Amino acid sequence: MTAVVLARHGGIEALELHRDWPVPRPGPGQVLVRVTAAALNNTDVWTREGAYGTAADPHALSGWRGPIAFPRIQGGDIAGVAVESGRRVLVDPAIYQDGSRDAPPIGLLGSEADGGFAEYVVAPADQVHDVTASPLSDEELACLPVAYGTAMGMLERAGLKAGETVLVTGASGGVGAALVQLAAARGARAYAVTSAAKASAVMELGASGVILRDAGAAVAAQARELGPLDAVADVAGGPLLADLLPLLRDDGRWVIAGAVAGALVQLDLRRLYLHNIRLIGSSMHTRPHFAELVRAALAGTVRPPVAATHPLTSLSEAQQQFLRHNHVGKIVVRP
């Protein structure tokens, strides 16, 4: 089969195109999936670069959960067709700690096991979801697992409800755009932090309004005009945590799943305990979260924006486009 294989940590040159890679064989409890579309994520870049570090050495070359084995086929966002049944499927890419309902992910297809940047992939049968009835295209379906799964996990852990107001940071990125769409779909008012250049595209996702991070006025000053916030869904981290925390109402929730703007922050702990504010860390999703995402895909209540589509053989070019950060939505490759 054709596959793009990560040979080692490094630059884009570490991605190698192979046209005679062995087709994987499903083991007990596994399904062979013919990949029809696979989307790109930050984790593909960070895993390639080995940028995650380890607890012992933040500068060590590492995947998300530690050292990874090479060669490795990346790609956690997978839509395809189950070879045996012929049904359209969406693959839950999480490698769960155990079989329990709320088990946390301890790995990811494309990192700790081979993923979807190939013509075929194997996955656990109970994580291969039938989406034959979905109105979404294969490209749209492929946008869902990692970014929308992460966003669904954030909103579920924060308990966001219809009628509430949530501020979304990094709203033009994959997870941020997913947060805006999923929050709006459940009847919440989503206000998006983004740039002026991407504001109109973010509004089209269903945002109730935008906070311009490049408009001169501080983000916190603009957000203060919204009144007390019920929740903040944060994929950026950094100094905004201290700036925006006072804007949360009593019993408000701050859920965070990223730190691209800075991993080390200062905050006034009194703001947390005197106002019963919950600070929630969220990494990916659980099985129930992903099942909720599948229901949304079947109902067509969210349609992920596809920024560009490339052939799998042009994955390097697709990743270069991804790294320019000029797009809103997801970049997809097709075998």
Image (cartoon, rainbow, N blue to C red):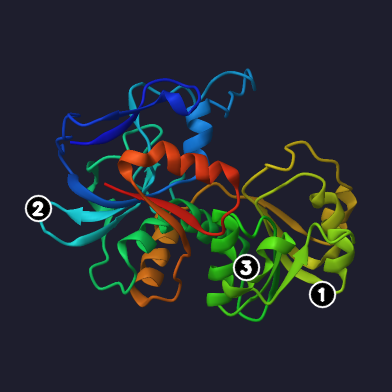
Tell me if mark 1 has few (under 14), some (14-19) or many (20+) residues whose alpha carbon lies within 10 angstroms of its own.
few
Along the line of sight, the residue nearer the viewer: 268 or 325 = 325
x and y percent of residue 188 in the render? 63, 77
The residue to which callout 2 is attached is 84
Mark 3 crowdedness (10 Å alpha carbons): few <14, some 14-19, many ≥20? many
Compared to residue 115, the image places residue 139 above or below, namely: below
In three-dimensional space, the C-alpha distance between marks 3 and 2, rounded to whole angstroms, equals 40 Å
| Residue occupying the point 18% across, 47% down | 31
Element type where label 1 sits in the image? loop
Q: Amino acid at mark 3?
A: Val
Residue 289 on image: x %, y %: 45, 60
Q: Is residue 20 above or below residue 143?
A: above
Pinpoint residue 235: horizontal percent, then vertical percent: 65, 51
Answer whether residue 106 is visible to the viewer in this image: no
Name the mark on residue 226: 1
Mark whose residue sits in front, 3 or 1? 3
Query: Could you tell whether 68 is left or right of 91 in the image?
Result: right
